Amino acid sequence: MDIAPLKVIAKIHNDFTSKFGIPRQSGLEGGLISKIVFEPEYRNKDAVRGLEGYSHIWLIWQFSAIDKKEWAPTVRPPVLGGNKRMGVFATRSPYRPNKIGLSSVKLEKIELSKEEGPVIYVSGADLMNKSPIFDIKPYLPAVDCHDDASGGFTEQIAKKKLRLDIDEFLLEKIPAVKREGLKAILEGDPRPAYHDDTERIYKMGFAGYDIHFKVMEGVITVIEVG
């Protein structure tokens, strides 16, 4: 049987310019807007006819910033502190045989652009800027949502939000429309779960800016925005 190669149909555009700081799962930070722009071959308004009737959609995409080529049967999920191994197929790790991601995002609107064709705006995406998208499918609540589903080993994890400390003059360096999104990412703790170095200064890329911060006793303090 011949296997057809996957085609990139679109790319996502947002403020996540590096892997560090991207929400760990889709839907966690709903205030952040991403734009999906189709490749020229697929800029046909008929291809999205009826999609506006759905509240959420599935994105099938590629982890485009993964350097490691080889896969391993087990990985160290950050949610478990990075010191316990689980089977790769029991996780959403990007280090898979095929670097494919699956995300459920909220459909905000669809606009028709003269230059880019139908453009889809979504919130809650966990994709890095310019990640290639292979397919878009509607989310069907009648079959995609299971009331009796269990979350495996992730159910034992209680994720607490940090208290954000940022001087107003630093916050004003970020465009006003992006400030709430930045706050949400920082309060959600962008560090790997196994990092707990109170002296370390972290750097996170967001919307073309470098955000420098430290974390101590549940408080995330922004030191510089450049």
Image (cartoon, rainbow, N blue to C red):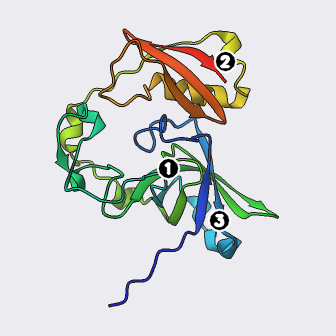
Residue 205 sits in quarter? top right
Q: Is residue 207 left or right of residue 193?
A: right
Marks counted in the figure total 3
Residue at 41% across, 56% down: 101
Mark 3 residue element = strand
Q: Which mark is residue 18?
A: none
| Vertical arrangement, residue 114 with respect to residue 81, above or below | below
At label 1, counting other C-alpha atoms closer than 10 Å, the crowd grade (few under 14, some 14-19, many 20 or more) is many
Dot 2 amino acid type: Leu
Marks 1 and 2, how far apart in space?
A: 27 Å
Give neighbour class at mark 3: few <14, some 14-19, many 20+ (Cα, 10 Å): many
Residue position marked by numbered label 3 in the rendering: 38
- Judging depth in this view, the residue of 150 and 204 nearest the camera is 204
Q: Residue visible at 23% across and 48% down?
A: 149
Nearer the N terminus, badge 1 or badge 3? Answer: 3
Of 47 and 205, nearer the camera is 205
In the rendered image, which residue does mark 1 sit on? 105
Q: Quadrant of residue 131?
A: bottom right
What type is the residue that disc 3 sits on?
Answer: Phe
Q: Earlier in the sequence, mark 3 or mark 2?
A: 3
Which quadrant of the rendered structure holds the C terminus?
A: top right
- Relative to 105, is 182 above or below? above
- Relative to 46, is 193 above or below? above
Instruction: Tell me the CA gap for discs 1 and 3.
Output: 17 Å
Residue matched to label 2? 171
Where residue 214 appears, as percent x and y from the top left, is 47, 15
Q: Give the secondary structure at mark 1.
A: strand
Q: Earlier in the sequence, mark 1 or mark 2?
A: 1
Q: Position of residue 188 (x, y in %)?
A: 44, 26
Whole-percent x, y for residue 207 in the image? 65, 36
